[in-house]
Each structure stands twice: as structure tokens, then as C-alpha cells.
Amino acid sequence: MHARRLALEILTQVEEQQAYASLLLDAKLKHSHLSQQERALATELTYGVLRWQGRLDYLLAAVTNRPWDTVDRALRRLLRLGAYQILFLTRIPAYAAVNETVALTQEVMRSQVKPGAKAFVNAILRRLLERHATIRFPDPSSDPVGALATRWSHPPWLVARWLTRLGAEETKALLRANNETPALSVVVNRLKRRPEEVQTRLARIAGSVTTGRFAPGIFHLKDGAEALRDSAFVDGWYFPMNEAAALPVLLLDPQPGDVVLDACAGGGGKTALLMEQLAGSGRVIALDPSARAHRRLREARARLGLDRVSPVQADARQAAQLFTRPVDRVLVDAPCSGLGTLRRHPERKWQQQEASLAALTRLQLELLHGVAPVLKPGGFLVYSTCSLEPEETDAVVETFLRDSPEFTVAAVPGSLPATVAELIDSKGALRTWPHRHGLDGFYAIRLRKRDR
């Protein structure tokens, strides 16, 4: 299998199965026999097409003699793959991009009995090559949403929301930031190694290494591909996590000896950080209903040496039926639209719909109400999402506080680094933005359960 075929397979699964590109890419590259150069090309093609799909579709539609949405979906994916190489990868000659895409079309469409597919792809890509410089984008003065959505490759409904809240200039800055390729960020596992040791090791295998701006013990790697294959990673010296994702744990501020509930544990990154904050004492109960997440939790527990972590495959909405004793602190990093993580997960732009936000809001409220009874009086709860949307952030907390008078917004802990404290707004909420802070977009707020 070559890089273009692998990228096409991932793009197909992302579109047809609503899958995560990063998980698919990791799994397929792990079992491929591609050279380092081919692996890099497969990665570039996968993320590049997903980032720029909106612009690619607009330009391809302009040179197709029929409505774009009537073109076979498999052919659309092939055309995007070829168009991305023509328009964005200057190191690949245009004729090679066309020829390779036509050859791939013949290879993958042979079994699908699509007469004329090869000739169609060839004609459209050659037409794009000839005309793309003359195609005009929508006029910002008459169609501000369309102009930004097509040029910066975001769905119009999302651009319209951000324009209303942020204005034209800041929306443009956010769209641009979402299309940047982020560095790989890793968190030091202090249960095994000191940050200085990890930084020295990373400098040898990843080239440029910079320290995190907000959270301690985090490094950003310009080229981090080898870091996740190195023996130091296998031995649990560090684990991948965006710096913004670490901030809710700092806001929760668990203390040695605490029993902490990680209500939506996922793959275990925040669980590991919670355990580190407990300084080797206390306990973390890592809850997640997904079998895949539970498997990753068990793997992380073994690799990172998290002996005092208890993975439990269960739904936090039923927490009251699972616990016989109250816990000291709760982290609810809730499932959400992921619209703050588009740099890392560009497919979310095309998978999410505005109508789905209401269902996510209901789930987030159910999770908060599910864990509220198991938190001891005087205990702290941090609610967080990797979303920028009010329905999943302020609105959820306002509704929860209205329905749960025993909870109130808590002051930030005195131990919070000054750089993180600067991210707290007048409502007591922590917010990060890709274009303002160079981080994923996150929201987090610290709540306290009143003493009886």
C-alpha cells in the first residue's frame, strides 16, 4: 500500500463511519511498511484534505459541469486528494499529482463498476490545474459568511456563529489558526522521570523542544513522530496531551490523600495527571462507558505506573448507584462537539452539525447531575469541554447551578500558576483559544458543593 491509497482509505472511513482521523492514521501506519517519507506524505494528505476540504470543494465545483453534491462520494474524495496535491503541495509536480490520482482512481474504482471514472477525474483535475488561479471566492461585502467559509475552509453555520460573537477580524484569525498544523505536546510523567531528564531525551529524538507556556511539565515538539515510538514513551516517561487539556486538572487542584473521580476518563491522560498531582497518595477512580476507552485506560495504567488508579467501565450518569462513599473531587471533562480542537481534529468541522449541540448539552447536564450526589459537602467539581460554543459551556453551567443550589462557582486555587490564572474571566471560567493562546479551545470552571 502506498501513501495516497492509505490516505484515501482513512478519508473514506472518516466520511462514511464518522471516525477519528488520528486514531485511524496511528493504527494504519503502525501496521504499514511505508518508508518514513511515505508515512509523512500519508499524514500530510490525510490532514491536509480534511483541513482544506471546504476550499477544495468550492474550487472543484467551479470546474465541474454538474452540481458538486451530485458527484459520487468516492469520486469526490479522489478529486479532493488530487486537488490538495495540486494546490498545496508545491514539492509534488502538478502532472504527477494528476497522474497518481488517475492511477489511484483506476485501482480503487475497478471493483465498483464506475464507467468513465478515470476519465472524469483526469478531466476535472486538469481543468482545475488550468483555471484555479482565475476562480473567484465570494465577495466579503455581499457574502461575508461565504467568503470566510470558502477561503478558510469551515462550514458556513459555524462561521456565522463566530462572526456574530467575535466579529470579522477575530473570526478570520480563529479560522486561520484552526488550519495550522499544531506541534505534538507531551506531558512528563513525574511518577517515573523528572522534566529535565525527559527534555534531554526529547531533544535527541524530536529536534526542536519548547516548554509549555501555561502548565508545568509540558513540552511541545516540532517533529514528534519518533517521540511516540521511542522506548522512553513505551516505558511511560511521558504521554501526549495538548497543553489546554491539562489546565482543568490544575484548576481542580487535587490534594495528596484525596479520592478523585475522573468521570469521563477517555484514554487516561487526565487520569495520569490527576495521579501525579496527588503525589503518590490518594486514589483516582477513572470512569468511562466505552470499551475502547477502558482498554486504553488499562494500557495507560500499566505503561505509566498508575497503581493507585481504578479503571471502571461505567456511565457517570449512574454514579450515584456505583459509589457507597463520597469522593473529595470530581473532574467532568464532558463529551462535546470538539469544536475547540479543529487544529488537531479537522474532521470535526464536517462531522458536527449545529442541531447536534442541543443533544450534547443534554448529555453534559445529565453527567453533572449524575456525579453531583457522590461529591462530599465542601468538595470541588471541575466541568470542562474542548468546545468554544456557549451551549456547551456557560449555558450548561448556568442551568446546572440553577437546578443545584448546593453548588456555587468557586474561587481559583491559590496554587494555580499565574499564567493560568490570567485565563480566568469575570465569570470564573477558564477559556483558551487557538488564535489567542496557540492552544486548543477549552472551557473549564471550578464549582464547590456547599457544606451542610
Image (cartoon, grey):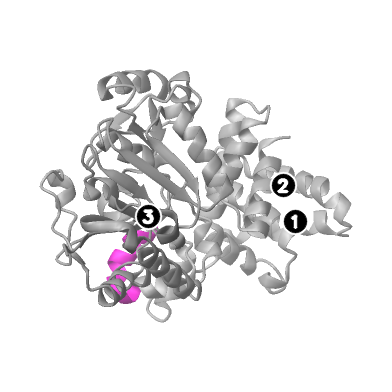
Instruction: State the residue lying farthest toward the left.
Output: 414
Label 2 or label 3, whichever comes before in sequence order: 2
Residue that badge 3 annotates: 333
Q: Which residues are magenta?
A: 163-175
Prevailing secondary structure of the magenta residues: helix
Q: Position of residue 122 (x, y in %)?
A: 75, 54
Instruction: Name the residue at 58% across, 26% down.
Output: 36
Pointers 1 and 2 in contact (CB under 8 A)?
yes
Q: Position of residue 153 (x, y in %)?
A: 48, 62
Q: Residue 38's quadrant in the figure?
A: top right
CA distance for labels 3 and 1: 44 Å
Residue that badge 2 annotates: 101
Can you say which quadrant of the picture contains the N terminus? Answer: top right
Under mark 3, the amino acid is: Asp
Name the element at disc 3. strand
Residue that badge 1 annotates: 121
